[in-house]
Image (tube, helix red, strand yellow):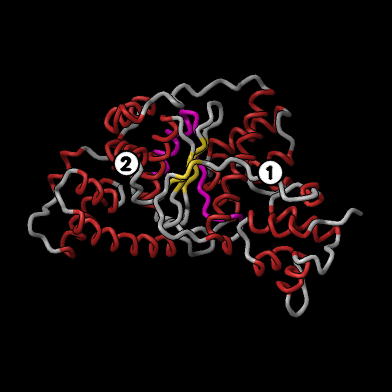
Amino acid sequence: MPRVNPEILTWAREAAGMSLDDAARAIGLSGADPSARLAAMEAGEREPTRRQIAKMAEKYRRPILTFYLPEPPARAPRAHDFRTMRDREPLAEARIEALVRDVRVRQALVQSALQDLEEDQPVPFVGSMRVDQGAPEIAEAMRATLQFDLGEYRAARNTGDAFRLLRESVENAGVYVLLIGNLGHHTSSIDPKIFRGFALADLVAPIIVINENDSRAAWSFTLLHELAHVFLGQSGISGYDGDAPIEQVCDGAAARFLLAPAELREIDVRGVPVEALVEEIGTFASVRKVSRKMVAYNLRKERLITWDTYKRVSERFDADRLDQAREAAGGPVDYYVVRRHRIGRGLTRLVDRMVASGALTSTKAGRVLGVKPTAVGRMTADNQAA
């Protein structure tokens, strides 16, 4: 068996966004200090077994042959980074890169299957708009494409049901919408402060990913923000409070889709203390099934509140948003119901049809859905449960 370059082991683990402790546990190393054993392998002091390399390939999401390359491969082009962040955590950034890479692989499998069935028709609105057309025009283009009923959205029982209506409209238009906040296990969770979503604006199989660790009230805004990126034909990673022109336009388009600027005049902001303003915004946002931070953002954009006031209420909403996301994550739920919800009806229905036609093997179908091949049937058995 050819020897493994230990540099490959370190590169593959770090590219997967895993610490030594997380990786040693995932690979199944035993002994008094599993992370020390893995560190010894990465230092070239210990040779991994074939079984351990196979586990690394699985957990690091790399083909086994990658581990026998003479040196780490050149870095692939990154998705455009639209985020504005002063301090970046290397581990979190590696996790985001691994997540984007994983979704790109899923996208490529979908593209190939669609081509095999000669169904690779371009989604007409991908790249149909320009940044200089401005947020109002992009919002109107999205509204016309989706034929979305805002009244029905606001009449939904809660923000989760409202998001489900919006997601279904976007998926019916040809965009796959995934909810992902980690690399397959809660120990690799990615904080929404680091990324809120990203778009892969492909002409045939555009995909939007929303960080499910964010509060549910924020999901609809993020979905529309990323949809604006798809309309602009721009793939990339988005965060909160981005100051790049394209981010401001996408934020503006998402906000106008859900909320008419004139409605903001209903909020009493004159001489109101911050605590009272937080309550006013909360009531306003709850009725319209939008996030409070989005309302505050629009109040600032319309110059109804100052930048300082926006920062103060925004910090409060950020703290509350993370608490709400943690609370929503609790409680026992059926594994396959959760998985279908994360993947969405659009992709589960497509995979079901592709497997039935022979365009996707169960192995590839499992890769697209993020489950083992033996679980594909359970994932696609009841598409209505998504």
Q: Tell me the amino acid under the disc marked 2.
A: Gln
Q: Which mark is residue 66?
A: none
Q: Position of residue 176 (x, y in %)?
A: 52, 36
Q: Tell me the amino acid under the disc marked 1.
A: Gly
**Which residue does the image show at 42% across and 39% down from the upper left?**
226
205 left or right of 193 in image: right
130 left or right of 234 in image: left
Q: Quadrant of the N terminus?
A: bottom right
Pick out the residue farthest to the left: 271
**Which residue does the image show at 38% across and 40% down from the upper left?**
225
Q: Magenta part of the protein: which range?
A: 163-184
Q: Position of residue 195 (x, y in %)?
A: 45, 52
Residue matched to label 1: 366
Residue matched to label 2: 248
CB under 8 Å between discs 1 and 2:
no
Secondary-structure class at tag 1: helix
Q: Residues within 10 Å of mark 2 (few under 14, many from 20)?
A: some
326 left or right of 291 in image: right
The reply to whether residue 176 is in sight is no
Secondary-structure class at tag 2: helix
**Which residue does the image show at 82% across and 50% down from the upper left?**
68
Which callout, 1 or 2, points at the residue further toward the start of the chain? 2
As rendered, which of 224 and 304 lies closer to the eye? 304
For residue 167, above or below residue 211 = above
Q: Is residue 263 magenta?
A: no
